[in-house]
Image (cartoon, rainbow, N blue to C red):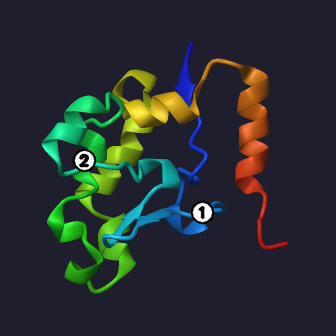
């Protein structure tokens, strides 16, 4: 059975993240670098990239732009982020991007991803 093993975060508490979040030069914080997709917000690009779906696009809503918040917590605790993260509980509801990069049915790969996600890259 396929499942999502997120490489970007610890599901229990986003403040305990061990890997870096992604960001976009246009002013958005993202769960990981793979969420920085060229063309989000431009219909011609969104239609040509099958990995862009509504959950991913929701992270780019104007109220989540860094200019429109006082703290990063406003972004990370938003409904959009909550929906994105909660979608990982079921492979079929997860964003296509997460299915592609973090989906697995291989137990050995799952174990290695869990170990890697706990490793500190500042050591």
Residue 30 horizontal/vertical position (percent): 41, 59
What residue is drawn where x is 29% and y is 77%?
66
The quadrant holding residue 69 is bottom left
Q: Secondary structure at mark 1?
A: loop
In the drawing, what numbered circle is on residue 57?
Answer: 2
- Return the residue at label 1: 17
Q: Secondary structure at mark 2?
A: helix
Judged by depth in the image, the label closer to the viewer, 1 or 2, is 2
Query: For the residues marked 1 and 2, what is the alpha-carbon distance in whole angstroms?
Result: 22 Å
Residue 68 horizontal/vertical position (percent): 20, 80
Please tell me how crowded label 1 is: few (under 14), some (14-19), or many (20+) other residues with Cα within 10 Å.
some
The quadrant holding residue 53 is top left
Left or right position of 112 against 10: right
What residue is drawn where x is 38% and y is 70%?
25
What residue is drawn where x is 34% and y is 27%?
93
Q: Residue furthest bottom?
A: 70
Above or below for 34 versus 97: below
Task: Choose the circle earlier in sequence order: 1 or 2.
Answer: 1
What residue is drawn where x is 57% and y is 13%?
1
């Amino acid at each position: 059975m396929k499942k999502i093993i997120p490489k970007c975060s610890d599901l229990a508490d986003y403040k305990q993240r061990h890997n870096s979040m992604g960001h976009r030069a246009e002013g958005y914080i993202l769960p990981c670098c793979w969420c920085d997709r060229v063309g989000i917000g431009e219909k011609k690009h969104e239609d040509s990239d099958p990995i862009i779906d509504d959950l991913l696009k929701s992270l780019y809503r104007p109220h989540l732009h860094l200019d429109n918040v006082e703290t990063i917590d406003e972004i990370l605790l938003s409904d959009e982020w909550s929906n994105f993260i909660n979608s990982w509980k079921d492979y079929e509801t997860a964003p296509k991007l997460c299915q592609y990069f973090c989906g697995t049915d291989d137990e050995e790969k799952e174990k290695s991803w869990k170990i890697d996600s706990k490793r500190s890259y500042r050591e």
